[in-house]
Image: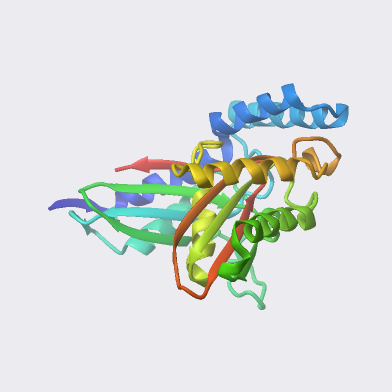
């Protein structure tokens, strides 16, 4: 059994909050550059170039790439052979968020109640997803989630008879209705299966995958390609100004389901598809 002081978790979360907002991943930046080569719309090309420049400035000056620095969504993979000491895990994570958003001068976007809209002033509490895994390590992933893209997400309780076509149509229709609101080019996370709450988690978790890395199942990899092609034919384009680059990638994650149901969920990331991870 390995002992780990939760103070290390707090320090890591604080750094990850800042890094996720300052440094756009190479996978996303490379997708911008590839899209720039393939985009036919002059306005779309200009937007993509601006996004590349914006990411470069954020990295160089260590400032947020977007004014919406998001709610802190934290994925924790806790090894079952780790014994946490020195405090509570949830509190350690929230203290890290508090510290990171304060020291990084990141916008605080959390309100203490969905109807009583008073800002908590430190961006806590974080949204924490905990999974117990084998081993003696802990993997922390911070994925700041902006409101504009999150608002365009959707869950639909499909039936088995809807089949693959029902899923494809639902995803494409969701993106079509979203239009320019989620700040395209977007990354589209899709969950299929499980239950009402599980499928939403699958859609969000899929966004952590390296951008464009296909599903390991050839069937779902082909579905990802099909959906991406249909989305990019919508003509929404970068920032909604028109063009062939509405989405950079579609990621699908699945889970077994009840014989009578087939839940599907769409979680959209804006062009600032941010997440950073660390293993302790």
Closer to the camera in the image, 240 or 122: 240
Quadrant housing the C terminus = top left
Residue that sits furthest to the front in the current view: 161
Residue 243 percent coordinates (x, y): 82, 35
Q: Is residue 40 left or right of residue 224?
A: right
Residue 275 percent coordinates (x, y): 51, 43
Say which residue appears at 70% left-offset and 28% top-offset. Answer: 35
Residue that sits furthest to the left in the current view: 1
Quarter residue 240 falls in: top right
Q: Is residue 29 visible?
A: yes
Q: Is residue 94 left or right of residue 68?
A: left
Closer to the camera in the image, 153 or 94: 153
Say which residue appears at 68% left-offset and 60% top-offset. Answer: 170
Quarter residue 123 falls in: bottom right
Residue 188 percent coordinates (x, y): 63, 48
Closer to the camera in the image, 143 or 170: 170
In the rendered image of this protein, does residue 60 appear above or below residue 169?
Answer: above
């Amino acid at each position: 059994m390995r002992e780990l002081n939760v103070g290390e978790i707090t320090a890591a979360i604080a750094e990850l909050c800042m890094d996720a907002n300052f440094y756009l991943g190479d996978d996303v930046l490379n997708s911008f550059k590839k899209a720039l080569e393939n985009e036919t719309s002059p306005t779309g090309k200009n937007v993509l170039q601006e996004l590349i420049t914006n990411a470069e400035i954020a990295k160089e000056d260590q400032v947020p790439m977007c004014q919406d620095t998001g709610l802190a969504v934290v994925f924790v993979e806790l090894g079952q052979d780790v014994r946490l000491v020195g405090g509570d895990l949830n509190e350690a994570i929230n203290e890290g968020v508090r510290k990171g958003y304060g020291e990084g001068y990141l916008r605080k976007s959390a309100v203490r109640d969905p109807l009583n809209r008073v800002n908590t002033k430190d961006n806590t509490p974080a949204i924490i997803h905990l999974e117990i895994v084998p081993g003696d390590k802990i993997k922390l992933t911070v994925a700041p989630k902006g409101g504009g893209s999150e608002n365009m997400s959707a869950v639909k309780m499909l039936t088995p008879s809807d089949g693959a076509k029902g899923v494809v149509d639902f995803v494409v229709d969701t993106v079509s209705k979203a239009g320019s609101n989620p700040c395209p080019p977007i990354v589209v996370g899709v969950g299929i299966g499980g239950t009402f709450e599980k499928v939403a988690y699958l859609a969000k978790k899929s966004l952590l995958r390296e951008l464009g890395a296909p599903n390991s199942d050839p069937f779902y990899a082909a579905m990802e390609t099909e959906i991406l092609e249909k989305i990019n034919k919508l003509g929404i384009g970068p920032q909604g100004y028109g063009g062939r680059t509405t989405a950079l990638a579609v990621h699908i994650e699945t889970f077994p389901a009840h014989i009578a149901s087939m839940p599907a969920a769409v979680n959209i990331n804006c062009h600032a598809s941010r997440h950073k991870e660390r293993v302790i």
